[in-house]
Image: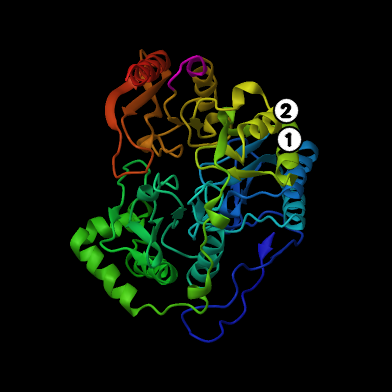
Amino acid sequence: MDVEALPEPAGSPEVRSDMEAPVRFPTDPIPAEPARAKLLGLHPQRQEGLWMQRVRVSAGRVTGPQWRALAAIVRELTPDEPLHLTTRQDLEIHGLTAATAPQAQRRMAEAGLTGLGSGGDTLRNVTVCPCAGVKPGAPELEPLARFLTAHLRSHLQAYALPRKFKVSLSACRDACGLPWMHDVGLVARSTDDGWVFDATVAGSLGASPALGIAWPAPLAAADVPRFVMAAMEVFIQHGDRANRRRARLRHVRQRLGDEAFLALLRETFDATAAPPGAADVPIEAPQGDKGLAHQRRIAVPAGDLPAEVLDVLADLADRGDVVVRLGIHQGIWVFAASEATLEAVLAPLPPSWVGGPVIVACPGMRWCSRSLVDTQAMAHRLWEDLGALPSRPFVAISGCPNGCAHSAVADIGLFGGQVVHDDQRSDAFTVVIGSSAGQTPQIGTLVQRNATPEEAIDLVLAHAREKADD
């Protein structure tokens, strides 16, 4: 399971013309080099000999045949594990072996799906808020996401960055693409002269989160590809390749200072050529601005999608009167022209999933070797407790200080850890409250360290009740 040798770059020595190298399947199913495996979306699980295959989903859009192909993979290759939603509009297949991993990749490829670029030190999935091209006034941004992916991956070092590079696109003023927590976040805005984008740069989370800073002027839509390429070029030239803990673009900004960083980005932006076709990428609101105004979020407990739910999603995706999109916070959005249509099409799903609590949990100790606590158990406990409340805050549960569930930017964020008393280890949580889900530059405020699971649940419920009273 390797990547074909890349062709010699055509034209400029700075770029190559291919977007994604094809994948071939030799006798060795798992690349020996961990970095190469991660580029293909393959990650070792906590259980020895088992693998996770990440599936990159462009703009959160999965077709009916693709849902069915994924359901078949789950049923036949990983019958003991559900398909898993991520926080970047990706999907994950868990429980693969060295023998079944290439089978899963073959079936993915046959369905038009890939894991290439869903992991490793490269451009990750360019996310798009689910309302794009659906809600009234929300422009269609999938063509721009695809163009950006192709353009950025044309760079000779696109698959060998200092670390990962994340880009998000938002189609609405709610900024539900979470721009402030990305290396580049772009929010579309309509003006008399056409669509422009407000940009934030150099944000990231991790164990020491720092959200981005605003670019001082709006970007014309045609300038977005060269702006993002300029940001990636700054990252390539100035990212720290010696210390992975200080290797993200925001560390370049911190090292230089905001003013010098923005000046460097401006200089690089001015020197970056516009790629052919950038001015022709369509960015249009729903025809006549008559989008599908009625929506429902399908809350997926612990991010797990069993095969029978995949069948329902496949049927929904085949319909012409509704739109199904993967969201950012392990949820799935369904849009329709009327409430009656929504109620009818969502009836086959578990009732508690429709409009249920927004709880994001990383895989935790179920799969991840870095996790310190059982995030899934905490997620299910909170699901039951929050489901009965009228106000349901966005809760993110991470199994370690890295905060992969976006705990630093949740209404209530939990970071898992361990405490030792009398030589006995027990689960503990650091609790933060009061962020804005990456839609603004506000990070949560520390409330308590080393909270027991019961104390953490009490804090979540107390905050939810306070919000309900407001």
Which one is in front, 70 or 134?
A: 134
**Residue ID at (42%, 38%):** 406
**Label 1 CA crowd tier, 10 Å (few <14, some 14–19, many 20+):** some
Q: Are marks 2 and 1 in contact (CB under 8 Å)?
A: yes
**Residue ID at (54%, 57%):** 140
Extent of the magenta region: 385-391
For residue 313, above or below residue 468: below
**Label 2 CA crowd tier, 10 Å (few <14, some 14–19, many 20+):** few
For residue 244, above or below residue 341: below
**Residue ID at (34%, 37%):** 436
User: What percent of the width, then of the height, locates residue 269?
Assistant: 33, 73
Residue 81 seen anywhere in this rendered image of the structure: no
Q: In this view, does 77 lie to the left or right of 273?
A: right
Quadrant containing the N terminus in the rendered view = bottom right
Residue 312 is labelled as 1
Amino acid type of the residue that numbered disc 1 sits on in the rendered structure? Val
Which one is in front, 205 or 350?
A: 350
Amino acid type of the residue that numbered disc 2 sits on in the rendered structure? Pro
Residue tagged 2? 348
